[in-house]
């Protein structure tokens, strides 16, 4: 792999938003035609992301975006709880510690902070 | 399924046909909403309003490629909670970069149907561009 493509792969792997937007030829965040609040859109995207079992980099990015547009820690946890019946325990058990890390909240191995 | 050969445990009185029907139609008695009975979650108030929660659920359903009944029920809840048809469509669209075109396209018809727009029936009256 030449340097250019190695750089591209590295950027994709770390969920570099600019690179992803360039590759997908679309904005990951902006949608001037949407009537939804940016926080709602961020939580919907987070829910979709949890469901597809993303890389931790993608999940952390989605959480950082949600926080940046005004969602609270509790909103993010509630989004996880909301999709729990849909995505199942396996996804939730994987996503919960990742979300905790993204929220800078150490839940430890026992689940107790 | 006239002669069930296996009786599912833990669901006395329910025939396999009934159970499958409940699962296929996202029956609330089979799938207590919002949390399944097998998951014990401490009761706590949710900061998200019902409309937002329904749209969040829609995002997860699109990502998983859910069945029509799941979309119908979720859209019904969203609309009943005050979401507009545009809100539902916007939520569908905003998942696109995450779930990809295939999932988005697959979800469009059942979500549209849940909104009262039967795309398939509509398209039947449109001449195909492919002969």
Image (spheres, coloured by chain):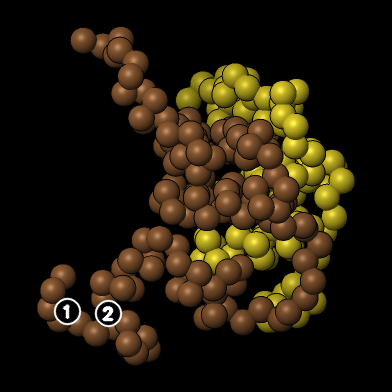
In the foreground, B102 or B35? B35
Residue drawn 50% across the image and 69% down it = B28
User: Chain ID for label 1?
Assistant: B
Instruction: From the viewer's side, name the closer residue of B91 and B86.
Output: B86
The image position of residue A48, as x and y in percent, is 58, 47
Task: Examine the rendered structure and indicate whether residue A28 appears above or below residue B19.
Answer: above
In 3D space, how far apart are the residues under numbered discs 2 and 1 (Cα atoms)?
8 Å
- Image coords of residue B43 (percent x, y): 73, 79
In this rendering, position of residue B21 left or right of residue B86 = left
Label drawn at residue B4: 1
Residue wearing tag 2: B15
Horizontally, is B115 left or right of A21 in the view? Answer: left
Q: Chain of mark 2?
A: B
Task: Indicate the chain coloured yellow by its letter.
Answer: A
Q: Which mark is residue B98?
A: none
Which shade of the palette goes to chain B? Answer: brown
Q: Secondary structure at mark 1?
A: loop
Q: Quadrant of the C terminus of chain A?
A: bottom right
Q: Is residue B98 above or below residue B53?
A: above
Q: Please name the residue shown 61% across and 68% down the image.
A: B34
Residue lying at 75% horizontally and 72% vertically, measured from the top left: A107
| Count of numbered circles on the image | 2
Residue A38: give x, y in percent of width and height.
Answer: 79, 38
Q: Is any part of residue A51 visible from this angle?
A: no
Question: Do the numbered discs 2 and 1 sit on residues whose CB atoms are within 8 Å?
Answer: yes
Q: Could you tell whether A110 is left or right of B45 in the image?
A: left
Alpha-carbon neighbours of circle 2 within 10 Å: few (<14), some, or many (≥20)?
Answer: some
| Residue A27 in view (yes/no) | yes
| Quadrant of the rendered image containing residue A26 | top right
Residue at 32%, 82% in the rendered image = B14
Across and down, in percent, residue B87 comes to 68, 38
């Amino acid at each position: 792999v030449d340097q250019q493509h190695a750089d591209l792969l590295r950027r994709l792997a770390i969920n570099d938003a600019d690179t992803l937007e360039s590759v997908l030829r679309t904005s990951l965040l902006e949608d001037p035609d949407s009537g939804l609040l940016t926080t709602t859109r961020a939580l919907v995207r987070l829910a979709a992301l949890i469901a597809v079992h993303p890389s931790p980099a993608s999940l952390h990015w989605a959480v950082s975006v949600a926080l940046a547009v005004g969602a609270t820690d509790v909103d993010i946890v509630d989004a996880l709880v909301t999709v729990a019946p849909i995505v199942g325990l396996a996804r939730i058990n994987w996503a919960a510690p990742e979300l905790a890390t993204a929220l800078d909240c150490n839940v430890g191995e026992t689940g107790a902070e | 399924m006239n002669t069930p050969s296996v009786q599912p445990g833990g669901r006395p009185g329910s025939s396999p046909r009934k159970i499958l029907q409940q699962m296929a139609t996202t029956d609330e008695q089979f799938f207590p909403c919002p949390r399944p009975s097998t998951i014990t979650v401490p009761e706590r108030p949710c900061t998200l309003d019902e409309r937002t929660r329904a749209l969040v659920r829609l995002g997860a359903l699109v990502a998983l490629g859910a069945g029509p009944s799941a979309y119908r029920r979720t859209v019904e809840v969203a609309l009943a909670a005050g979401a507009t048809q545009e809100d539902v469509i916007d939520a569908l669209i905003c998942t696109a970069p995450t779930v990809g075109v295939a999932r988005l396209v697959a979800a469009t018809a059942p979500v549209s149907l849940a909104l009262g727009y039967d795309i398939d029936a509509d398209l039947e009256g449109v001449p195909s561009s492919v002969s």
